Amino acid sequence: MKTKTLLACAALLFLLASFGKPSPPPTLYLIGDSTVNNPTPPQLGWGNAISTYFDTTRLKVRNNAKAGRSTRTFITEGRWEKTIAAIKPGDFLMMQFGHNEGSPPDTSKAGRRGVLRGTGEDTKSLVWPDGHPETVNTYGWYLRKFIREAKAKGATPVVCSMIPRNEWKDGKVIRASNDFGKWAAEVAQQEGVAFIDLNDITALKYEKLGPDEVKKFFPGDHTHTNEAGARLNAESVVDGIKSNKKLALNKYLKKL
């Protein structure tokens, strides 16, 4: 009888300890290129600034983006494999690619990042100098891979269109609405996931400020922002989150 009583007490203590142990907070994983993660002063990516807009006691932010990567090389270098392995149910995955995908895909230095244009199932077979083969897919195919594998792990994917470059025509910022921005939106709609039109949200802000003010955000070229530009782009991400009331990320934003 004494043994049974001790076992019952031990079981009760274990149960109480289990109830008392808080579950770990969810994580927002960011994947993309240097416009998302660029900790090289004076340049900064919006992903390096985004955590200041969240309550990080309730949501962790993990910036896995890497400078110079495309959807294709993010996978071939094993970066996606490490990211998806870490994702757990309840997490979020935010992706923003497009700046490095534009070259014709091949095995040269210039073409190693390139993808096929569009969202279809077209492929291109390559053989690298060391003999290993690679099948190159469309931009949309790579985004679908990220989305579907994140969903399978119980995470919530969010697709962002690429931030605009400091390029103007007739007083307007040049959009990606005919290529990578358009394709990102199409894939998000097809897969039934949230889409943030970061390209247009930020372009509208740039146009309101004007070319002279916007130029101050780009200390070295027309693609990479400084800290002020990164914060403006991070605020555009937040604007996109707030515009989608169904997106659970809203409840982790700081109340400003």
Image (tube, rainbow, N blue to C red):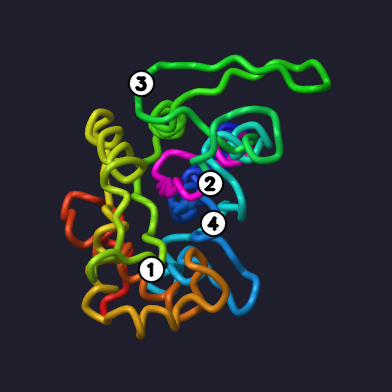
Residue positioned most to the right:
130
Q: Residue at x 28, y 29 (%)?
A: 191
The first of marks 3 and 2 along the sequence is: 2
Number of the label disc, if any, that sits on residue 107: none
Closer to us: mark 3 or mark 4? 3
Does the image show residue 153?
Answer: no
Residue 118 place in picture, x, y as percent: 36, 29
Does the image show residue 242?
Answer: yes
Residue 194 place in picture, x, y as percent: 26, 44
Number of the label disc, if any, that sits on residue 100: 2
Residue 35 place in picture, x, y as percent: 50, 60
- Say which element carries label 3: loop
Q: CA distance from mark 1 to mark 3?
A: 30 Å
- Say which element carries label 4: strand
Within 10 angstroms of label 4, few (less than 14), some, or many (20 or more) residues? some
Number of the label disc, if any, that sits on residue 120: 3
Q: Quadrant of the C terminus?
A: bottom left
